[in-house]
Image (tube, grey):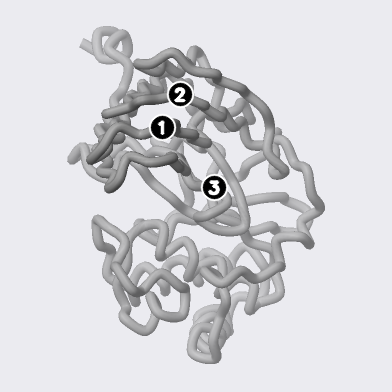
Amino acid sequence: MHIRVRRETTYRYAEPAKAAIQKLALTPRNYDGQHVLDWRIDVDRDCRLRACEDAFGNVVHTIYVDGPLEALTTVVEGAVETFDTAGVARGAIERFPPELYLRETPLTEADPALCDFAREATARPAAALSKLHSLVDALHEAVIVEEEPASGAGTAADVFARRRGAAQNLAHVFIACVRCLEMPARYVSGYALRADAGAAVHAWAEAHVQGLGWVGFDPTTGASPDETYIRVAVALDHLGAAPVRAAHAGGGEETTEVKVSVARAQSQFQSQS
């Protein structure tokens, strides 16, 4: 499947900012489940744009802009050919051994209730992969999916206690549960093509299965990612894989507007008519 993505992000400042810096984890990489056909980043001001890899192997762009700035807009756009690999992320760049992803973070720390839930949901299956599918199915049934992350309930334990959360929240809960089972797990940010045009910016998780590798699981659907997903960045939690992290000098209060479109490439629609 060919999928085209366009993300426009505008920052506005109450007073002209002296300077701004942004870290963008918005560029996907090739692996067995996807091939990047084209991708570009445009900024509406003269700037210094530097590309590098972070510790996890994600493509990261850093933008430095001198002021005065009343607003700053970045546009990220491109096309990706995707394939259904049943969630298996073979061919992805790996900088660390799987054991690193047993490490807890404040957002993914489990409490006794989470661990009890994880063990109960996986009590019957014997194989690791079957346990993970049972877990993601049980979590999908237990937690209500919301469009936006719940304020004041960002940690995995808090989200599970509320039994509701957005995609990034549910990814944290799943990661915490998997680590309770003493299996490595990590956070994934990206995009998902939806028939109702919703949930374009998305998040899910991957767990490491011995002998198989990293496998994706999406608690918002209770299933593994397929060809409708674009995988962009991985980390221990959302903070490490956040699409945009920004700071500015001066400027007073900052407001942000994000417009995202995710759609099948027009040529593919034409070929099916």
Labels 1 & 3 near each other (Cβ < 8 A): no
Picture coordinates of residue 95, whole percent (x, y) = 78, 43
Name the kind of residue labelled 1 in the image. Lys
Residue with the mark numbered 3: 241
User: Is residue 3 something one can see in this rendering?
Assistant: no
What residue sits 40% from the left and 18% below the top? 43
Split into 4 quadrants, where in the image is the N terminus?
A: top left
Q: In which quarter of the image is residue 210?
A: bottom right
What residue sits 40% from the left and 69% below the top? 154
**Which mark identifies residue 18?**
1
The one of 105 and 233 positioned closer to us in this rendering = 105
Badge 3 crowding class, 10 Å Cα cut-off, few under 14, some 14 to 19, many 20 or more, is many
What residue sits 35% from the left and 25% below the top? 68
Name the kind of residue labelled 2 in the image. Asp
Task: Tell me the SS state at disc 2.
Answer: strand
The one of 184 and 136 positioned closer to us in this rendering = 184
**Which mark identifies residue 76?**
none
Comes first in the chain, label 2 or label 3: 2
User: Is residue 60 something one can see in this rendering?
Assistant: yes
Picture coordinates of residue 156, whole percent (x, y) = 47, 73
> Disc 2 versus disc 1: distance between alpha carbons?
6 Å
**Which mark identifies residue 66?**
2
Picture coordinates of residue 8, whole percent (x, y) = 30, 27
Labels 2 & 1 near each other (Cβ < 8 A): yes
Picture coordinates of residue 125, whole percent (x, y) = 60, 75
Name the kind of residue labelled 3 in the image. Ala
The one of 177 and 25 positioned closer to us in this rendering = 25
Comes first in the chain, label 2 or label 1: 1
Task: Tell me the SS state at disc 3.
Answer: helix
Residue 258, above or below 50: below
